[in-house]
Image (tube, coloured by chain):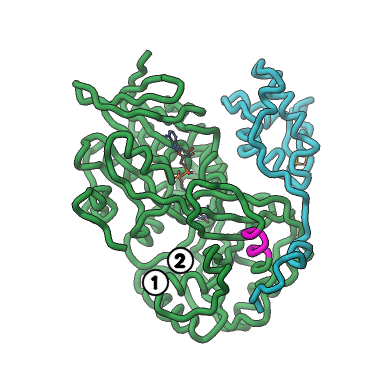
Chain colours: A cyan, B green
């Protein structure tokens, strides 16, 4: 039965509210845990669209203050880069043929 | 308050969770103590390959076969696809010298039961149309497979929990003692204490530090690997790929292979694998830089240069992030698995370097057999931690 939990919280990776809540209920209470298990936040926008919402869901479900949930290692939103762009910037003495 | 269990597992990476799962399945009461969160170690920052072709005939290859069979049965047992797939793999050969070494290696592997062959240039290009022209041949094995490490870990933990296993995050172990009754008393940074007659050290690259807490020697070095992840793109070939160059230098250290200084310093080797999420993981480096698990601009650039030189169309693909993990490396390239003679009841299961995903199921199963039945088959002797006991200094 489709209900209000079957909409995407993370659009890039198509992860629903239901999936995220399930993992929180299992005891995973950090953004990184939820991200690694569901892939929410691993998509093209690197969590810029969904990260805050996920933090809020964790905060609501666990009663942890939002600031505490947001305090995460959250290592890598790097800017999306074309491989070529970096290649051109690369050291010019590179010897690969 | 002290909590009592049958077994304490230290480290909640793929190896610790596999050990925990198989021990729980055999009826043991188990707690897994992890210093960080879910998949904080190497198991959360790696490729997903169950590789055969990279292994020398011997114990590693033998165990990889058994692990593959376990993966197949785990798909049902853990009620998840686990991202398990069987795309096969190819090792790309650039010149005659590499070809010679790879031909010999392939023969050895075949005699060991691995289904692997050398493909001609035409056959190779049929499977990998976007490869750079310079590759003259490749190997191909249909057996090379993959599994999604996050799914495997999550499902080990979930199924284990359903049977009573506990996993405690944010609990770095800082002390291990043996009490008068012969039990281990393990203390975490939060001053929680856990007691059990058995301890399993599954702390990956940190296994040496954990062993040190009870005065044991497990030589383990972190070997950093960096990889980049692309956006989702359509498949660019049939199989996973990697380069012969690295394998050849490993198999025949004497052979002259043209490598740049940077390649040598970074231990650069090409590896490309298609993930669950339709993106590609491209790697990787093999660096000894202590416990620093940051990515570096030099590393990322080198991986990108190499990737574009192997598969030119990749230059138009976006990469969305870079990750780095610390492979647990032993001096002889073999994992450490077994009970320490000096401290009965204390086991180590660590040191899988670049093969921990491949070998996780078989490691957990063998470890559980050792703990539960007190037995270890003779062929595992060469993996015993006792090979590093102080008088048996290893030459590598
Ligand atoms: C770039 C890269 C690519 C790779 N590709 C592949 C591949 O394609 N196929 C493959 O099979 N393998 C691959 N590997 C290797 C694989 O990732 C490792 O072999 C495997 O993850 C090791 O698992 P582990 O559980 O032993 O270590 P880890 O995952 O590192 O787990 C050890 C855990 O112990 C914890 N810990 C440490 N000290 C303590 C303490 N005192 N108390 C409590 N907990 C502690 C850590 O936090 C950590 O979570 C790759 C590795 C890298 C880096
Ligand atoms: S919406 Fe979640 S990663 Fe983009």
Q: Chain of mark 2?
A: B
**Which disc number belongs to residue B109?**
1
**Which disc number belongs to residue A48?**
none
Q: Chain of mark 1?
A: B
Name which of mark 2 and mark 1 comes first in the sequence: 2
What are the residue bounds of the magenta stretch?
Answer: B298-304
Q: Which residue is mark 2?
A: B54
Is residue B229 left or right of B106 when viewed as pictured? right
Q: Are marks 2 and 1 on the same chain?
A: yes
Is residue B45 among what the camera can see?
Answer: yes
Disc 1 element: helix
Front position in the image: B3 or B103: B3
Q: Of the residues tagged 2 and 1, which is closer to the observer?
A: 2
**Residue A94, above or below B356:** below
Disc 2 element: loop
Is residue B237 among what the camera can see?
Answer: no
Q: Main secondary structure of the magenta part?
A: helix
Give the CA distance from mark 2 to mark 1. 10 Å
Asked whether mark 2 lies closer than 8 Å to ligand 1, one says no
**Residue B286, above or below B43:** below
**Residue A34, above or below B57:** above
Image quarter of the C terminus of chain B = bottom left
Is residue B333 left or right of B13 when viewed as pictured? left
In the rendered structure, does residue A81 fall within the stretch colored magenta? no
Do the residues bearing badges 2 and 1 touch, measured as CB atoms within 8 Å? no
- Mark 2 packing: few (<14 Cα in 10 Å), some, or many (20+)? many
Q: Residue B334 appears at what percent x and percent y?
A: 35, 56
- The residue lying at 40 percent from left, 58 percent from top is B65
Quarter of the image where one finds residue B55: bottom left
- The residue lying at 59 percent from left, 28 percent from top is A28
Image quarter of the N terminus of chain B = top left
Q: Residue B213 appears at what percent x and percent y?
A: 33, 34
């Amino acid at each position: 039965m489709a209900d209000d939990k079957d909409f995407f919280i993370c659009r890039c990776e198509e992860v629903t509210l239901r999936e995220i809540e399930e993992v929180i209920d299992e005891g995973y209470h950090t953004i990184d845990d939820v991200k690694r298990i569901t892939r929410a936040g691993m998509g093209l926008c690197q969590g810029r669209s969904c990260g805050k919402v996920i933090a809020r869901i964790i905060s609501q479900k666990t009663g942890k203050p939002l600031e505490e949930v947001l305090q995460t290692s959250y290592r890598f939103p790097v800017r999306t880069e074309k491989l070529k762009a970096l290649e051109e910037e690369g050291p010019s003495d590179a010897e690969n043929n | 308050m002290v909590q009592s269990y049958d077994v304490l597992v230290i480290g909640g990476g793929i190896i610790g969770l596999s050990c925990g799962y198989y021990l729980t399945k055999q009826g043991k009461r188990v707690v897994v103590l992890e210093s960080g969160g879910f998949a904080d170690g190497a198991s959360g920052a790696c490729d997903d390959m169950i590789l055969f072709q990279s292994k020398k005939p011997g114990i590693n290859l033998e165990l990889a076969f058994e692990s593959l069979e376990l993966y197949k049965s785990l798909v049902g047992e853990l009620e998840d696809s686990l991202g398990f797939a069987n795309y096969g793999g190819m090792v790309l050969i650039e010149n005659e010298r590499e070809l010679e070494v790879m031909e010999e290696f392939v023969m050895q592997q075949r005699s060991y039961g691995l289904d692997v062959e050398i493909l001609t240039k035409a056959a190779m290009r049929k499977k990998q149309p976007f490869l750079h022209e310079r590759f003259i041949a490749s190997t191909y094995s249909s057996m090379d497979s993959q599994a999604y490490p996050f799914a495997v870990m999550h499902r080990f933990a979930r199924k284990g929990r359903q049977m009573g296993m506990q996993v405690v995050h944010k609990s770095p172990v800082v002390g291990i003692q043996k009490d008068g009754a012969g039990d281990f008393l393990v203390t975490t940074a939060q001053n929680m204490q856990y007691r059990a007659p058995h301890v399993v050290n599954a702390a990956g690259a940190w296994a040496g530090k954990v062993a040190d807490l009870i005065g044991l020697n497990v030589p383990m070095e972190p070997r950093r690997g960096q990889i980049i992840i692309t956006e989702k793109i359509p498949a660019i070939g049939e199989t996973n790929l990697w380069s012969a160059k690295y394998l050849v230098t490993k198999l025949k250290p004497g052979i002259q292979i043209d490598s740049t200084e940077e390649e040598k310093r970074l231990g650069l080797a090409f590896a490309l694998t298609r993930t669950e999420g339709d993106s590609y993981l491209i790697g990787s480096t093999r660096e000894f830089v202590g416990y620093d698990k940051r990515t570096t601009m030099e590393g990322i650039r080198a991986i990108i240069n190499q990737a574009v030189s192997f598969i030119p169309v990749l230059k138009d693909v976006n990469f969305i992030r870079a990750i780095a993990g610390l492979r647990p490396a032993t001096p002889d390239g073999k994992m450490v698995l077994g009970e320490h003679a000096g401290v009965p009841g204390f086991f180590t299961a660590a040191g899988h370097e670049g093969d921990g995903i491949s070998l996780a199921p078989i490691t957990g199963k063998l470890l559980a057999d050792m703990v539960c039945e007190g037995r270890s088959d003779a062929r595992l002797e060469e993996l015993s931690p006792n090979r590093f006991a102080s008088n048996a200094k290893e030459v590598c």
